[in-house]
Image (cartoon, coloured by chain):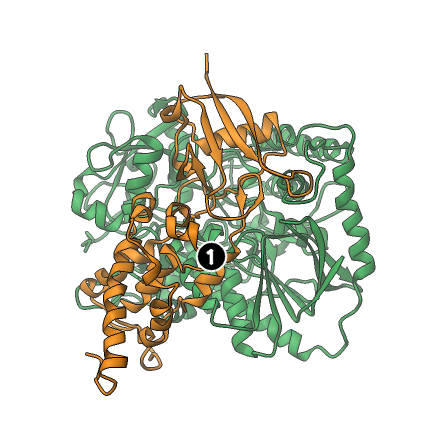
């Protein structure tokens, strides 16, 4: 006999709903079932109109983030056995506009990602062979390159909730990923974003972003390192205008 | 209906699509490139590829060896001229990814490291830990943001190709957020829509890997080639099919049955020693390993798990340091999804559908027979995989042929003399057909038809096949298409973000692609590579050293033809794995 669990989903349809509402479904489950599989069960068998994003099922594509009992999580690696016997409440990621039900509008993040120049800006045009980079040099940026853009950190960030212009954890971590890469020379171009009012100085170091990251990225650390960089940059540009960086 | 004018429309934002878009943008920045994808590009399934990408770089390696491994791995069903081009361009594309920032794993001297992979003679697989696809995809996506001529249309579902006078004129797409119809008018379309693994139940593929792009081309008149060759990856988690990369075995992991016995030695992959050595035992090709599992299960030597039979993938002797450094993703996945600590326990695994070797027929320039239509990546059959793909050839295929497809489409768009034809009329007709799905008053649930399709595919066109079983699946698919036409009833009649509606459109395409696969399997009365027939156990070069072509025939079953294979320098021989060999040193 299968156990069942109640899954309460936030519902919102832009064509018919003035405000979000909640709907509860009774879902039979086995111990190996993820919350995502629970949502898929609802969609397949109970209510085909429930709307959510998913894709890889293995916590690497970053599609299925949602608020699970108020905490940002990937639904594919959250298991119903761990939520049972209570009722589980599933809502779209906090701080983003809702498109429909659990699907949020990701446009703001994508614009921010574009703005930080998330690509290698090499010092000199690359030659025929690869750049040399030792494992130690890779260490400087490697963890920041693990970001899957799932946006859990934005849903966790109180500052982003208050000020939507804040560049935010994932984009700043990725900015740092390129700045810290020994093959890159684009730091000066990116410092403008770091220094801006909505750059690193908007962060109040709550560090909840790092706590919720499913990939062990530490955006709070990236932001903090860039506060130091930003201070140095300010000092060199305004107080020692003829000074040379490093 | 909104109309967007572009020169080139790239459908699909995975590795191949992004590489194609970049190539077209670099060819001429004046070309308007529309990148249309049903998910935001970094969600595409390239992201889940783990092991790595092949490119000759070691002193003891050569293009000749990569060619020979690929052609014999493919059981001589590869287009050899295309394989020659492919192996000659792999390394330069992997270097280009490095220049764009891809964090390939390094040796202490700062050069890129390589690892072993199944069926490869030399360590030639470039890897970024076991997140190679993830890093390739994010590198390509983030690099694509540099090109202002690439205009992205994220979360647009392509429902139809607009073809007039035998030429592709555009794409009909649905903006997912609003449900609004868009016509993209263009000179050339590049399909980079991935494989069709989701026509099966137990697979490693993301939800997006539905074969819908193949279905679009197939319906529009382009043939699908060699669809019966579906790859089962031998090491996946039972139930979910979540992938435990071949790189585990490349790093030295072993496979044992319920008695702790390395059973692969009983299936032409032994002897055990010296271990490790290339192309033997656990480093054999995927088709052979998956087939050995099937046989082992028949002998009752597999382990029973709640999700079905399994064998053990054992990494323990590699040690915690190497496991965490080289295989962090699968360690995490084994813990999360199977509750297994790979450092301390063996991981239960079984074969699951993984890769579609066949696809939309293209030549070496990625042109399909339909003018203006190009294809690259898993959705295409450019001819390098033959009857069985070697692991790490596809991650490099997407960049080698993604670039070719982008450049070919750009050249075609630049040479185009006639103005873009107004495709609005056919687009309107097509749109109203898809909209009518929303109005079905009666019919079956989507999941019912989908599940019956998947079960029937597993049953009739699994790892081993027979005339009778395939025949039943063909009949079932015809029945399901008929039931689909009679009506799928949707709970959701609205337009905004109606994923039920899009899934219904997708299912229509999937059923037709599944039919091409099953009928291809029925017609191939031999065993070759990943296609094993219990009733025709041997390879039959006299009759079947040939490609299968499937042509769409409206509501009926596809027409199957066979066509000669291009052989340039490697005449078919017996495929040979195991046997004697040098002990390899794993770095």
Residue A179 seen anywhere in this rendered image of the structure: yes
Rendered view: B368 above or below A101: below
Q: Can you give x and y, in whole percent of width and height, for residue B496 in the image?
A: 66, 45
Rendered view: B561 above or below A29: below
> Which residue carries the number 1 mark?
A109
Left or right, B209 with respect to A221, comes to right
Which of the two residues, B202 or A118, is positioned nearer the viewer here?
Answer: A118
Which of the two residues, A100 or B78, is positioned nearer the viewer here?
Answer: A100
Rendered view: B521 above or below B573: above
Left or right, A68 with respect to B212, comes to left
- In this view, the residue farthest toward the top is A1
Rendered view: A184 above or below B243: below
- In this view, the residue farthest toward the bottom is A242
Q: Who's the residue at 70% across and 40% down the image? A: B494
Crowdedness of circle 1 by 10 Å Cα count: few (<14), some, many (20+)?
some
Q: Chain of mark 1?
A: A
Which quadrant holds residue B261?
top left
Residue B15 seen anywhere in this rendered image of the structure: no
Q: Quadrant of the N terminus of chain B?
A: bottom right
Q: Quadrant of the C terminus of chain B?
A: bottom left
Q: Can you give x and y, in whole percent of width and height, for residue B335 in the image?
A: 29, 35
Colour of chain A as rendered: orange
Q: Can you give x and y, in whole percent of width and height, for residue B366 in the image?
A: 58, 65
Q: Who's the residue at 42% across and 70% down the image? A: B89
Disc 1 secondary structure class: helix
Q: Can you give x and y, in whole percent of width and height, for residue B395 in the image?
A: 42, 57
**Image mark count:** 1
Which quadrant holds residue B417?
bottom right
Q: Which chain is green?
A: B
Left or right, B279 with respect to B178, comes to left
């Amino acid at each position: 006999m299968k156990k069942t669990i109640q899954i309460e989903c936030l519902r919102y349809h832009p064509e018919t709903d003035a405000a979000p509402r909640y709907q509860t479904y009774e879902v039979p489950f086995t111990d190996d079932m993820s919350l995502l599989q629970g949502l898929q069960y609802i969609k397949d068998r109970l209510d085909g109109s429930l709307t959510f994003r998913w894709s890889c099922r293995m916590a690497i594509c970053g599609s299925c983030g949602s608020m699970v009992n108020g905490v940002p999580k990937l639904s594919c690696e959250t298991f119903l056995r761990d939520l049972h016997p209570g009722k589980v409440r599933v809502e779209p990621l906090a701080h983003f506009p809702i498109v429909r039900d659990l699907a949020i509008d990701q446009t703001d993040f994508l614009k921010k990602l574009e703005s930080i120049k998330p690509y290698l800006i090499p010092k000199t045009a690359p030659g025929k062979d690869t750049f040399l980079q030792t494992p130690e040099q890779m260490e400087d940026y490697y963890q920041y390159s693990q970001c899957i853009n799932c946006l859990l950190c934005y849903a966790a960030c109180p500052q982003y909730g208050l000020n939507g212009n804040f560049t935010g954890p994932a984009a700043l971590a990725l900015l740092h990923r390129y700045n810290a890469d020994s093959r890159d020379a684009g730091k000066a171009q990116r410092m403008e974003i770091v220094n801006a009012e909505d750059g690193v100085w908007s962060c109040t170091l709550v560090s909840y972003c790092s706590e919720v990251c499913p990939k062990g990225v530490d955006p709070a650390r990236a932001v903090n390192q860039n506060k130091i960089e930003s201070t140095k940059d300010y000092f060199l540009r305004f107080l020692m205008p003829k000074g040379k960086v490093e | 209906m909104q109309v967007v004018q572009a020169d080139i429309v790239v459908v699909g934002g995975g590795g191949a699509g992004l590489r194609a878009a970049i190539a077209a943008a670099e060819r001429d920045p004046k070309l308007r490139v529309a990148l249309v994808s049903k998910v935001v590009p970094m969600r595409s399934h390239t992201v889940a590829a783990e092991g790595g990408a092949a490119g000759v770089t070691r002193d003891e390696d050569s293009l000749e060896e990569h060619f020979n491994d690929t052609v014999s791995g493919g059981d001589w069903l590869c287009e050899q001229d295309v394989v020659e081009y492919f192996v000659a361009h792999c390394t330069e594309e992997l270097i280009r990814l490095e220049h764009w920032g891809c964090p390939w794993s390094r040796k202490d001297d700062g050069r890129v490291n390589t690892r072993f992979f199944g069926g490869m003679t030399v360590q030639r697989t470039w890897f970024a830990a076991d997140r190679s696809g993830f890093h390739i995809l994010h590198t390509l996506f983030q690099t694509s943001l540099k090109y202002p001529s690439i205009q992205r249309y994220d979360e647009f579902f392509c429902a139809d190709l607009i073809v007039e006078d035998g030429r592709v004129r555009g794409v009909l797409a649905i903006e997912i957020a609003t449900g609004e119809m868009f016509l993209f008018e263009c000179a050339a379309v590049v399909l980079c829509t991935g494989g069709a693994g989701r026509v099966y139940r137990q697979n490693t593929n993301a939800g997006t890997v539905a074969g819908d792009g193949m279905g679009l081309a197939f319906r529009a008149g382009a043939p699908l080639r060699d669809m019966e060759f579906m790859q089962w990856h031998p090491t996946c988690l039972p139930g979910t099919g979540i992938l435990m990369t071949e790189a585990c075995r490349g790093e030295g992991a072993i496979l044992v049955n319920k008695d702790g016995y390395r059973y692969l030695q009983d299936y032409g992959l032994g002897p055990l020693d010296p271990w490790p050595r290339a192309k033997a035992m656990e480093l054999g090709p995927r088709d052979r390993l998956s087939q050995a599992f099937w046989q082992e299960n028949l002998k009752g030597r597999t382990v029973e798990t709640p999700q079905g039979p399994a064998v053990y993938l054992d990494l323990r002797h590699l040690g915690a340091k190497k496991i965490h450094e080289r295989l962090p993703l699968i360690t995490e996945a084994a813990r999360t999804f199977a509750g297994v600590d790979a450092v301390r326990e063996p991981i239960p695994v079984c074969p699951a559908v993984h890769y579609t070797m066949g696809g939309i027929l293209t030549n070496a320039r990625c042109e399909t027979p339909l003018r203006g239509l190009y294809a690259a990546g898993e959705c295409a059959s450019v001819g390098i995989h033959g009857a069985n793909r070697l692991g790490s050839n596809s991650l490099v295929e997407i960049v080698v042929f993604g670039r070719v497809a982008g450049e070919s489409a750009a050249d075609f768009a630049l040479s185009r003399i006639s103005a873009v034809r107004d495709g609005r009329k056919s687009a309107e007709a097509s749109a109203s057909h898809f909209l009518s799905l929303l109005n079905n008053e009666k019919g079956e649930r989507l999941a019912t038809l989908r599940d019956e399709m998947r079960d029937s595919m597993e049953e009739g066109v699994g790892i081993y096949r027979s005339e009778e079983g395939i025949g039943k699946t063909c009949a079932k698919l015809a029945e399901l298409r008929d039931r689909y036409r009679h009506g799928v009833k949707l709970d959701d009649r609205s337009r905004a973000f109606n994923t039920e509606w899009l899934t219904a459109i997708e299912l229509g395409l999937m059923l037709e692609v599944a039919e091409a696969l099953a009928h291809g399997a029925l017609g191939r009365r031999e065993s070759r590579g990943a296609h094993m027939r219990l009733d025709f156990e041997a390879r039959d070069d006299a009759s079947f050293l040939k490609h299968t072509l499937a042509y769409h025939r409206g509501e009926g079953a596809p027409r199957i033809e066979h066509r000669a294979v291009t052989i340039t320098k490697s005449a078919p021989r017996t495929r040979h794995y195991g046997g004697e060999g040098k002990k390899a040193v794993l770095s």
